[in-house]
Image: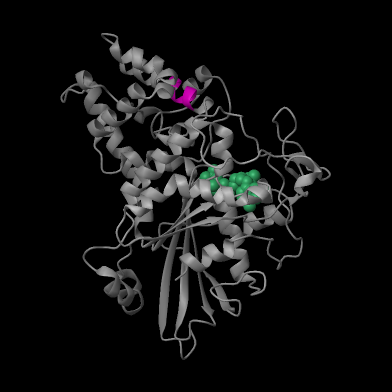
Amino acid sequence: MSFLRLKTTECKVGVVGLYNSGKTVLLSSLINHLQDHDPDRFPLGSKDTRVRKFCVLPPDPGWAAFNYTGHRDALVNAGKWPSKTTDRSQFACRFERSDWTFSDTLLKLYDLPGERIADAGMVGRDFTAWSEKVLALFVNDTGYRTCTTPFLDAIKRPGATAADLLHTYKLSLANLILNFKPLVSPSTFLLDVHGSAARPDTPEVLAATRFSGADAENQFCPLPADLRMPGTELFDSFAFRYDRYVERVVEPTVVAFRSCTALVVLVDVTMLLAGGVGMYDDTRQIVRDLFDVLSPGENAVFGPVLRGLSKVLLPHQWRPGWITRVAFAAPKMDLVHPADRDRMLMLLRRMAERYAADRDGLKYDFFNLSSVVSTRAMPLEAGGRVLVGTPLRGADGRKIAPGAEQRFTVSELPDDWPMAWAPGAYSFPEVYPRMPARKDYPPDQVNVDRLATFVIE
Ligand SMILES: Nc1nc2c(ncn2[C@@H]2O[C@H](COP(=O)(O)OP(=O)(O)OP(=O)(O)O)[C@@H](O)[C@H]2O)c(=O)[nH]1
Ligand SMILES: [Mg+2]
């Protein structure tokens, strides 16, 4: 810290969103732009602001370091997107900005595997309350009822054993995955505690090889009222395993985000359109659960004035943290034709605004962004909505090696969310990243600078 900079402003920014929604790519692009700052390519606050003396700090105790170097290396040297996140991580850095005369910035960024946010509904609920929540969803929603029939049938059968219940619950979770429904909880079924992700397979194979809990010995599933009898082996063991799971898996990942000062909620509009109406409904449910758990908004005890003071005057570990800003962001804007990019923002707003608007004292905004611009667009007259990029998948949906750039067509975005749409009704093919090879030259981005200006305050 220089002589004049007497204070440090601490910003803790958590990024949440479903798996594959672009959290890690966004953080990698943001860090790259702060580290190798060019005010013309990344205006922070104003176009004259300069970032100086950027230095990386070790993460807080108990946090794994966000693998920025590895992610950037994958992008630049291997021409690949970063690999899937398997554990929560933190990136900490300190820098000065020329528009903040008396204060330097301590920025902490948080990443997590997207699968874990489906467990947000467990926080603050005991096993009974969670069972009721899950069963109500399975029984009352047609899409869920269809996928979870094996389990709903098993809980009605007299004398069903723990093994029957677990097996049919896992078959049901596998059906949910195969029907593009992201509310898969316990999320370890999709991504286990060692970071190993479920591979596409039949429900039977998935049920036989994955766990509904932390590991083979600690599995549980929801139980209906007539099986929830304290003192029985079934109820007591499931309730115990559930509590341990919440403590060991859910709280460290999801609840840790409560102490952030700002939250970025990524809603991948392209994935929701491609995934069908069920994916949309579930994502809304997950955002609602997350908001209940993280309760963003002004803290009633401290209020805005004291919060402002405590942020710079109290020692770091004493500073009360709570989320006062939420940025909703629709990533991968470069997979949508420029003619539709305003619609992308509108769809995001229509989906998410009410959750934020219901919170007192919360500042929120909406962004459509590209963390790493990887396509270019053909003019609209050229026949449909045509983009140019390097395709990541072949016609059969399998990953292919990077080849030459190609033209491909993307769907037109609707003006508003349709009443219903099937999986596959919209398509936005994935592409390989386009990164400048020069190490200190960050990727082309759109609106990541505006998002950063909003959350780093
Ligand atoms: N074209 C384009 N694709 C992107 C962009 N950002 C992310 N993607 C695509 O989205 C995929 C997932 O991005 P990640 O950042 O790894 O997603 P995540 O949210 O961290 O996913 P988890 O680690 O599974 O929770 C990438 O592999 C890319 O295919 C972008 O700015 N442009
Ligand atoms: Mg990730």
Q: 13 above or below 118? A: below
* Residue at image location 56% in from the left, 52% down from the top: 24
* Residue at image location 67% in from the left, 73% down from the top: 40
Q: Position of residue 18 (x, y in %)?
A: 49, 43
- All told, the count of numbered labels is 0
* Left or right: residue 294 compared with residue 110: left
- As rendered, which of 262 and 157 lies closer to the eye? 262
Whether residue 172 is in magenta: the answer is yes
- As rendered, which of 340 and 328 lies closer to the eye? 340
Mostly what secondary structure, the magenta segment? Answer: helix
Q: Residue furthest right?
A: 404
Q: Position of residue 359 (x, y in %)?
A: 31, 55
Quarter of the view holding residue 297:
bottom left
Q: Residue furthest left?
A: 231
* Left or right: residue 283 compared with residue 359: right
Residue 52 seen anywhere in this rendered image of the structure: yes
Q: Position of residue 170 (x, y in %)?
A: 43, 23
- As rendered, which of 4 and 448 lies closer to the eye? 448
Quarter of the view holding residue 316:
bottom left
* Residue at image location 50% in from the left, 48% down from the top: 348
Residue 389 seen anywhere in this rendered image of the structure: no
Which region shows up in magenta?
Answer: 171-176
* Residue at image location 68% in from the left, 51% down from the top: 338
